[in-house]
Image (cartoon, rainbow, N blue to C red):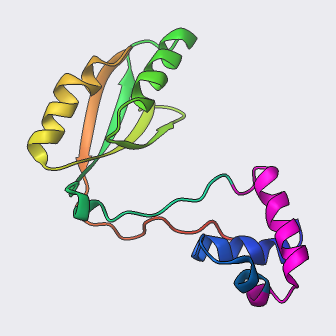
């Protein structure tokens, strides 16, 4: 990966819908090599996907919580079952396995506190191997969806 590839990555992170012509102009390269490089970045998995960033409030998901999950048991089968079940819950936006205690950090969005309480009581707490859930409510977003530094 060279400086030109890093410029391409910076530009497509700012605007994933930028045309090849505009991208080439912004990075100072002709269209054909820009297209080739972009395609290589996509094929190699450096660029994993393109997506729209949706304002959660505009779709009725204004309540956010961070959930710390401590597992009762941490054998391979339990962890895999937990992770698979967690990934199937649409309100889970991110989930990370951590070193130490707690075992997982899960970011969820719901419409309100009542919907979150229902999600925690009836879905999250019933996942395989869960011993304890500890939630922290998000007061305000300070940094969100930041581009990866190139």
Q: Please tell me whether residue 46 belongs to the stretch shown in magenta.
A: yes
> Residue 3, can we see it?
no
Q: Is residue 150 above or below residue 113?
A: below
Camera-nearest residue between 80 and 13:
13
What residue is shown at x 76% (from left), y 74% (from top)?
A: 8
What residue is shown at x 26% (from left), y 35% (from top)?
A: 134
Q: Is residue 75 above or below residue 27?
A: above
> Residue 93, can we see it?
yes
Which x, y percent locates residue 131? 31, 18
**Left or right: residue 124 compared with residue 49:** left
Q: Is residue 21 above or below residue 122?
A: below
In the picture, the quarter occupied by the N terminus is: bottom right
**Left or right: residue 12 compared with residue 130:** right
Camera-nearest residue between 72 and 138:
138
Which x, y percent locates residue 140? 26, 66
Camera-nearest residue between 99 and 16:
16
Image: magenta residue range = 25-47
What residue is shown at x 12% (from left), y 46% (from top)?
A: 113
């Amino acid at each position: 990966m060279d400086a030109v590839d890093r410029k391409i990555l910076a530009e497509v992170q700012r605007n994933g819908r930028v045309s090849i012509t505009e991208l080439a102009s912004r990075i100072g390269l002709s269209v054909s090599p820009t297209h080739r490089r972009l395609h290589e970045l996509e094929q190699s998995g450096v660029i994993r996907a393109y997506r729209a960033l949706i304002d959660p409030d505009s779709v009725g998901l204004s309540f956010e919580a961070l959930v710390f999950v401590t597992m009762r048991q941490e054998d391979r089968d339990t962890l895999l079952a937990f992770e698979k079940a967690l990934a199937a819950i649409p309100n889970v936006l991110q989930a990370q396995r951590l070193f130490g205690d707690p075992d997982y950090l899960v970011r969820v969005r719901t419409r309100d506190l009542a919907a979150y309480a229902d999600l925690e009581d009836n879905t999250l707490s019933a996942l395989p191997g869960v011993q304890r859930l500890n939630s922290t409510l998000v007061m305000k977003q300070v940094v969100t969806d930041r581009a990866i530094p190139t």
